[in-house]
Image: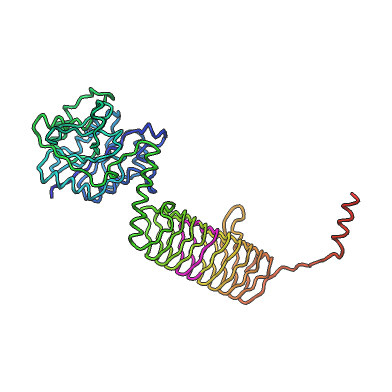
Amino acid sequence: MSDLGVIILAAGEGKRMKSSLPKVLHPLGGKPLLLHPLETARSLNPKRIAIVVGHGAEAVKEICGDDGVVWVLQEKQLGTGHAVGCTREIFRNFSGDLLILSGDVPLISKESLLGLLRHHREQDAELTLLTAVLNQPSGYGRILRDEKKELVGVVEERDAVSCEKEFKEVNAGIYAASPRFLYAALRELDSNNEQGEYYLPDIVGIARKSGKPVRTVRAGDAREILGINTREELAFMERTLQERINRRWMEAGVTLKDPQTTYIEEGVTIGKDTVIGPNTHLLGKTVIGERCRIDGSAYVTNAQVANEVHLRFSVVLTDCRIAEGAIVGPFAHLRPGTSLGRGVHIGNFVETKEAIIGEGTKANHLTYLGDVTIGRQTNVGAGTITCNYDGFQKYRTTIGDRVQVGSDSTLVAPVRLGDDVYVATATTVRHDVPAGALVYNERREKARAGWTEQKRKKMKKG
């Protein structure tokens, strides 16, 4: 197979997005729009990838990185033909085929691109276009064919007459071309059109006039070629992408109780026989094991969740690890650096941060565990707080195995509790406690007999 070069057009401002953010950086499925066609292009193992940037060029470069990419600046946005022409020096003397993609067409698949390239090479064509049939083709250039169904040209919607606007077959803006033909044809473009730009599709007419073979390939799934120009189209594409992802996981043995409200990003991994409830977000590089249960309204980012974990209703997990058989929630918040051992229970309104919690330990109610290491089979009572910050620095608390921490206790770091320590209810611990000890604060409890009646009498007199 001959070498392959890829050109991705990403210079447009995207005025209809009404945003200060370059269009190709708007997020789709948890990553910038441009990364979708870029990753697909990379899967083809091209020899060279050139990305044409213009509006917000530095921001686009910063987010997408330089790994295996040649950046080409289109200083003035004079149309798609001009944008491709800016890559002339990059592909001078290139011997393979060129594939031209759009940075705002995110769902194009590797299979469709391979089919386009295969047809292009089998037909020994100079130019091959990917087309699609849309029921509502508004906004797309129309494919023009003669009475023999041969391609004769492409007309942009702004320049089309009424009868041409009724055509359903559209130009996808995705091309395979030979470099020699492409750059020669680009020199012949003019800007005599409604927008005063150099249209890349006009090279179809140039090829036809010179007798160069031009071919088309129709996309099997028209949704692959849809571009994004507005927020509404972005939302539609998000829904389309999510439907694909959700369908793939259901086919792999994952139960989604309400797929329409389940949001799973592309980098997520889920084990079979896991059940996921409504309004769940699984984001980033999250890994969910087998036979897990997520009740719903969970927001999980970059979490590593082992097998048979139960995430009860309305939990938030970020950059944390949960071992097999643990139970989290409802209404729990696991912040970065949290690591739960096997069978750990983290319950109602418990928050953890940089917390390493050993096997079988439980903290079931209204507790803050920050910058703490807890051993095995320990129980942390309701209202417990690890006081990790003194206003200047953060300090760590260490709690041993089989410790019983009574409700409403405060552990003032840095402090260490040995194994089998018993912390009495409402105790403030400021010093290390040796193994097996009881720690408590001296307090006197007083009761005033008849106080309530006396209070009522005073209130009546007042």
Residue reaching furthest top?
192
Q: Residue 460: horizontal and vertical position, in percent? A: 89, 52
What segment is highlighted magenta in the picture?
316-343
**Foreground of the two, 196 or 245:** 245
- Residue placed at 59% from the left, 70% from the top? 379
- Residue placed at 18% from the left, 41% from the top? 176
Q: Residue 81: horizontal and vertical position, in percent? A: 23, 31
Residue reaching furthest left?
211
Query: Is 22 situated left or right of 117 in this image?
Result: right
> How many marks do you count on the picture?
0
Query: Is 236 situated left or right of 326 in this image?
Result: left
The quarter holding residue 412 reads bottom right
| Magenta span contains residue 319 | yes
Q: Main secondary structure of the magenta part?
A: loop
Q: Is 223 situated above or below 378?
A: above
Residue reaching furthest bottom?
436
What is the image's colouring? rainbow
| Magenta span contains residue 359 | no
**Foreground of the two, 198 or 433:** 198
Q: Is 370 situated above or below 243?
A: below
Q: Is 219 situated above or below 188?
A: below
The quarter holding residue 364 reads bottom right
Q: Residue 441: horizontal and vertical position, in percent? A: 71, 68
Q: Residue 258: horizontal and vertical position, in percent? A: 43, 55
Query: Is 230 situated left or right of 374 in this image?
Result: left
- Residue placed at 19% from the left, 30% from the top? 202
**Foreground of the two, 322 or 325:** 325
